[in-house]
């Protein structure tokens, strides 16, 4: 730290690194800290930790500080003034390369910012850097480790976004979710992961995986931070989330995939339900219509066809640089007939109507977030099943840290709401945390 | 033409320039012509005409010929082998700049092809060049003139795509439609314009205008050509469209905008209906539910908000290079609350369900394509109202040249079908042309 810049006691380096978005925005706006102090603390953390965590695909301390300095000198304003953010490396940035976890794009840089990045910057945010993604936001893992246990995956495909936020290198990160790429890494790393209703945040400048389900989302350490940036990404002035006036109407849906749930997920769901009921909200369990089990296949068809089409150029020009797994997915997609693809789209469109009338019986529905703890090893970023169903259905979803597994790793719980009810979902999540006291054991 | 490359009589230069996609693919596959001969004929046409028409934003004769040579030498295969295509300048191409009708992107070149471009190339197509677009596929006109009357607009925003195909500089072109940017220029230039069901062709590598309605489409001189490329863009092997086994069930919907229809559009609809009925298909007129008139406002909200968000980077970094009209649209979008935007999305989602049950009473529905002939002047690319409603509703639509206005300019008729019924729509359009003899007067 340079002389003359001593921060007051409550804002020592460790504290700065742990500031939430809301706290940071407030402290900067009040002049209690500068953006440069905050960014410097995060750079320090990154320098200390990223050798082990490997969250960043591109990180330039000088450039981050230059942005912070501009904020401090009044070049920008807005609700994110001076607040650092991390950006998943499938979202374009004019000042950092966008490499998409693929050697095909080594060093490639876009001309512009993705819309979501630009909206954060226009609100005053400092882009710290780009976070590592699985290849084209798919399943082929990258080098990032789980900050809570380096022998385990952080989840994917928003691996670096989750790791950077969980390890206090950034307070919030943009991620993308096609299957479970925001909520699963959030759960594996003990974070809040929020996926808005499909289309909630503008996707211009996002590299598509499967465009009819790709959704931009947020990874943060608090619900309030997700809500704050959610407002900014909708072009709104952030306001404090209004607490629910009464207990929410709560549904519970274990889904047809319940047999995939490991004991820690079963325990997590049981514990969460018990806490919600203890807080005064009866929980009504329901089952999905049996034919919803067919959605797994429909999702695979849509995913494979759309990935194959969206990567048509890479398929021909650089097939040797695609991972074997992606080549297999694309070959599957190429082999699927357009009729089968359209049938799958129709089937999913009908399921979206059906789930809407089911979900609207509740304010919020509890569903499993993940199979269990983050698996050991970096070769597999985890099973997206429990997240992917809800992504496919276009509904907003959020995961909160709720439990610890047998190895002490976090296990999240997922809440979903009907399409468009993002604000109710966030408010219900706050109720879950503050009234039903849903959190990980060690925090209790 | 170089010595030793004399083409046989039926394939003289004028004939080559007029070949359809289907004819060209067949002639090349049979060895009757080479791709180089065809491309050379189109280059000749371009050199003779583009000074007046100004269809191309980027055109490189040597590069086009090099692609054709590679095709002729067997480097590529597939149903489009050697067939030239034009590409609207909001779709990325690895070998030509993508300038989007905006000085912000002067000379900018993407790393890759848009998915739709790559799929055509993977099927063997030769990309002739990039066609001029209105600024970011919006309403701010560019320099292209109508090939049928240089004092008139070709329509927009796929201005160059329409002009290139209408003037025989290319047999087919990719366009995009957010309001009426494929069908209106097609109608103004006497072409077939086809917009598939929303999402029909993969949008990776397309610059978004309003992403929840942006649709990639085709401009061609024949229905068969649109159907042929439609198959390719769906990853399918093109097959001949099966003729309808019996007359289609035909609806007629003048829409709540009928008062916008000029006399030539009224005459066109009357003539088309009479011909359909004369061909043995009773035409049942229906009215849209009255609240559909509110969709005009909902569309404006969605359009303005999504354009404002998608151009968030340009707004801050290069506002001085945006047209005043676009700045106004974006300012409108920024001022609209996210709640109003989401209400508009919900309203449109309900209307999509409602129109589906209405349209499914018919095989095909006749609707006006345009207000009338292409207006005089290049400052205004025409009124999108009659096309935009159906784009908003996500249904597939096609326009065919059907009539001539008081100035001898073409007037199209539009047909629409329910979501997903693209194939039925194309087959019905063929029936309209071949059985009901719908075409422009001079062709009759």
Image: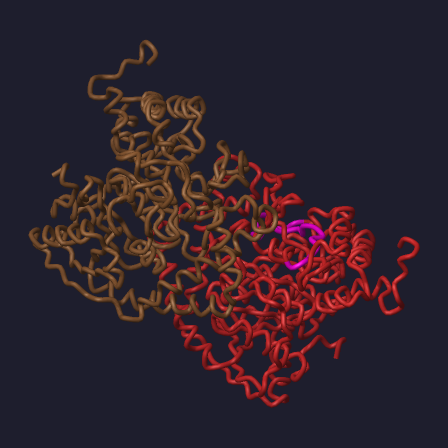
Chain colours: A brown, B red
Between A142 and B177, the residue placed more toward the observer is: A142
Query: How far across and down, in percent of the image, does residue B100 sit?
Result: 60, 46
Q: Which residue does the image show at 67% across and 52% down from the upper left? A: B131
Horizontal relation, residue A442 to residue B40: left or right: left
Query: How far across and down, in percent of the image, does residue B283 sit?
Result: 54, 85
Query: How far across and down, in percent of the image, does residue B345 sit?
Result: 38, 59
Q: Which residue does the image show at 56% across and 45% down from the upper left? A: A320
Between B117 and A64, the residue placed more toward the observer is: B117
Q: How many labels does the image show?
A: 0
Query: How far across and down, in percent of the image, does residue B185 sit?
Result: 64, 61
* Quadrant the N terminus of chain A occupies: top left
Tell which residue pokes out farthest to the top in this image: A3
* Quadrant the C terminus of chain A occupies: top left
Location of residue A35 with respect to A421 vertically, above or below? above
Q: Which residue does the image show at 61% across and 79% down from the upper left? A: B242
Between B33 and B310, the residue placed more toward the observer is: B33
Q: Is residue B146 visible?
A: no
Between B383 and A41, the residue placed more toward the observer is: A41
Tell which residue pokes out farthest to the right in this image: B3
Q: Which residue does the image show at 32% across and 20% down from the upper left? A: A37
The residue range painted magenta reads B123-142
Query: Is B138 within the magenta?
Result: yes
Horizontal relation, residue A272 to residue A345: left or right: left
Query: Is B96 within the magenta?
Result: no
Q: Can residue A276 be seen in this view?
A: yes
């Amino acid at each position: 730290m340079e002389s003359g810049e001593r921060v007051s006691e409550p804002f020592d380096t460790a504290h700065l690194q742990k500031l939430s978005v809301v706290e940071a925005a407030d402290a900067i706006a009040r002049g209690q800290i500068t953006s440069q102090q905050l960014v410097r603390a995060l750079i320090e953390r990154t320098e200390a930790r990223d050798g082990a965590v490997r969250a960043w695909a591109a990180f330039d301390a000088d450039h981050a500080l230059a942005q912070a300095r501009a904020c401090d000198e009044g070049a920008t304003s807005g609700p994110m003034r001076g607040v650092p953010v991390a950006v998943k490396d499938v979202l374009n940035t004019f000042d950092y390369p966008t490499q998409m976890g693929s050697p095909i794009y080594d060093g490639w840089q876009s001309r512009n910012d993705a819309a979501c990045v630009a909206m954060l910057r226009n609100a005053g945010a400092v882009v710290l850097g780009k976070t590592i993604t699985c290849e084209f936001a798919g399943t082929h893992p990258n080098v990032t480790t789980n900050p809570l246990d380096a022998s385990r995956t952080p989840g994917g495909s928003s691996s670096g976004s989750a790791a950077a936020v969980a390890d206090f290198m950034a307070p919030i990160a943009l991620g993308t979710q096609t299957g479970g790429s925001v909520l699963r890494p959030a759960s594996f790393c003990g974070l809040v992961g929020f996926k808005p209703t499909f289309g909630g945040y503008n996707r211009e400048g996002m590299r598509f995986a499967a465009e009819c389900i790709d959704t931009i989302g947020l990874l943060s350490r608090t619900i309030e931070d997700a809500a704050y940036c959610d407002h900014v990404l909708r072009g709104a002035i952030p306001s404090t989330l209004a607490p629910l006036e009464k207990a929410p109407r709560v549904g519970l849906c274990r889904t047809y995939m319940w047999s995939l749930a490991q004991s820690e997920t079963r325990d997590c769901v049981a514990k969460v339900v018990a806490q919600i009921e203890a807080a005064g909200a009866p929980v009504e369990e329901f089952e999905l219509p049996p034919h919803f089990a067919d959605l797994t296949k429909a999702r695979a068809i849509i995913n494979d066809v759309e990935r194959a089409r969206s990567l048509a150029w890479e398929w021909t020009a650089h097939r040797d640089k695609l991972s074997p797994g992606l080549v297999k997915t694309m070959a599957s997609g190429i082999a699927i007939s357009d009729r089968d693809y359209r049938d799958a789209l129709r089937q999913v469109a009908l399921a979206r109507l059906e789930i809407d009338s089911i979900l609207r019986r509740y304010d919020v529905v509890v569903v499993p977030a993940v199979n269990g703890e983050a698996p050991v090893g970096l070769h597999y970023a985890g099973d997206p099943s429990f997240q992917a169903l809800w992504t496919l259905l276009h509904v907003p979803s959020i995961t909160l840290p709720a439990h610890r597994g047998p190895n002490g790793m976090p296990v999240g719980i997922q809440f979903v709401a009907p399409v468009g009810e993002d604000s109710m979902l966030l408010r219900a999540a706050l109720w879950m945390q503050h009234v039903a006291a849903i959190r990980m054991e060690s925090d209790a």
